[in-house]
Amino acid sequence: MRTSTRPSTRPSTRTLTRSLTVAGAVAAALSLGGLTAAHAAGTTLSQGHVDALDVEYDGTALQLHVHDHSAAPAVEYAPADVVLRALPASAYTVPSGTCYSHLGTAGSTVYRLPQVEAAGLLWPGISGEHLAAGVFQGDKVKVKLASVSGPGKITVYKNGLCPKSNRSYDSGDATLANTRDVAAGEHDHANWAFTKAGTYTATFQVSGTLANGTQVGPASATYTFQVG
């Protein structure tokens, strides 16, 4: 499901500096190379493949976008202009064992957008596909979960022998760095879990060091998640 109270579009040329829109702003429409980039405050994405953390570099600044692969052609949003929704069907019962204790008490219900695509749910990815090789030291940048406001916590983790040991982010665990590297060309998926229903805002920061040693960022973007 994809709804918008005020759809509009903006230029999609990746070398063009993008700025976040504000309510009432009117953006120009332009489609290049099969990608339509859009500003649409009030747009809700609740199904299909999106790169929630889509990292780009325009030659001056690093930026985070939301890239909706399920649209045809694909659509790109500023994080401030979109709501990412975990539908009631994303309800997930916490398994027993310490390897799932980061999700809460065994048997309790949380909401999880799973690492493996599930029909009818949002499938959020993490992408460095628009970062060119050779630009940043180590061909990678860092994306940090800087803050979360909401009724519970957000934790992003990978499946494995012990999922608790495979967390990239956990807003309820101050012992974690809550920072992960995103490599040039990378496209990855993880479980995005929310421990309670409600509305969350999460601020992510992206930073990197150019091959010549120049520090870029951090640049911040705030996301809204509606859960349950």
Image (tube, rainbow, N blue to C red):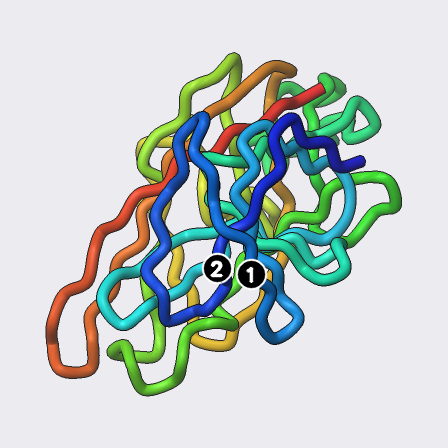
Q: Which amino acid does label 1 sit on?
A: Leu
Q: Residue 45 carries which label?
A: none
User: Pointer 1: what residue?
Assistant: 30
Q: Earlier in the sequence, mark 2 or mark 1?
A: 2
Residue at horizontal 48%, vertical 17%?
150
Q: Residue 11 carries which label?
A: 2
* Residue 213 place in picture, x, y as percent: 11, 76
* Numbered-mark total: 2
Q: Give whichever of 149, 175 is nearer the camera.
A: 149
Residue 98 in sight in this render: yes
- Name the quarter where the C terminus is drawn: top right
Residue at horizontal 77%, vertical 60%?
72
- Judged from the image, the secondary structure of the residue bearing numbered disc 2 is loop
- Judged from the image, the secondary structure of the residue bearing numbered disc 1 is loop
Q: Distance between the residues labelled 2 and 1?
A: 5 Å
Q: What residue type is labelled 2?
A: Pro
Which image quadrant for residue 75?
A: bottom right
* Residue 120 place in picture, x, y as percent: 86, 40
Q: Give whichever of 95, 2 is nearer the camera.
A: 2
